[in-house]
Image (cartoon, rainbow, N blue to C red):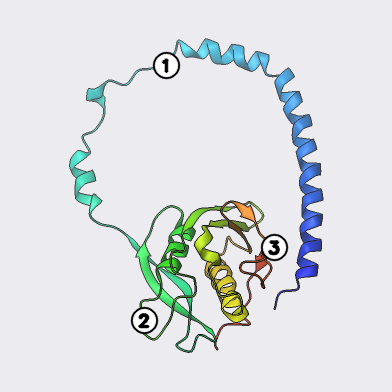
Amino acid sequence: MWDFSRLREQEKQRSALRVRLLLLAIMVGALLVFGGCSLSERLQSLKGSRTQVQPGDLPEMADDLESTADLQEMTKVVLYFKDGDGRWLVPERQEIPKVTGIGRAALEALCRGPVSKDLKPSLPAGTEVRGLNVKPDGTCVVDLNQAATKIPAQNSKAEALAVSAIVNTLTEFPTVKKVQILIEGQIRETLAGHIPIDVPLPRNMAFVKE
């Protein structure tokens, strides 16, 4: 399980570090502003030396673009869904189009549900991805719509499985170390009343069936 007190303390330390880095960036920016006049003059002198490319100089690539447009490259991702009893998460490999922002594409596939008839969706119906961004420190910030919170108040296990499914699906990617879940652009204390999501969460395999 997650140690939420330790996670919150680590987040406070990272926030203090970000403040110090911001102050350093402001100082560096001030130096660049005062030293940027000569650079601006040099750029102005280079404007007149640009070479314009005529339409006839470009290779004709329309046919090649049309012939490759239909060849969509695919990739396999690992998604986490509930087993038939709804008690555990089970990894399922799905093949989805390989696109820029593959993490968001994987999470959208998680929202759509499993391919196998033996598995059940791990997220409430209607859950949608509003945004996703991976920070340099490996924290993936994912913004979901309000439908993601539509879990019965008494079903804390389903809530834990939903949070774990999101975190484990995204941490399958090596660039993602932790996941911060937002709802409608806001940090919430819990997803649906039980499982805290106010701090970035690391991978947690406690709810995954072995």
List x then y, in percent, for residue 46: 50, 14
> Would you say 198 lies left or right of 182 here?
right
List x then y, in percent, for residue 156: 62, 78
Q: Which residue is tagged 1?
A: 50
Q: In this view, does 69 lie above or below 61?
A: below
Give the quarter of the figure containing the N terminus. Answer: bottom right
Label 2 vs label 3, nearer the camera: 3
Question: Helix or strand or loop: what does disc 2 sit on?
Answer: loop
Distance CA(mark 2)–CA(mark 3): 33 Å
* Comes first in the chain, label 1 or label 3: 1
Quarter location, residue 12? bottom right
Distance CA(mark 1)–CA(mark 2): 58 Å
Q: Residue at x 43, y 64 (%)?
A: 126
Q: Which residue is tagged 3?
A: 189
Tag 3: residue type? Glu
Tag 1: residue type? Arg
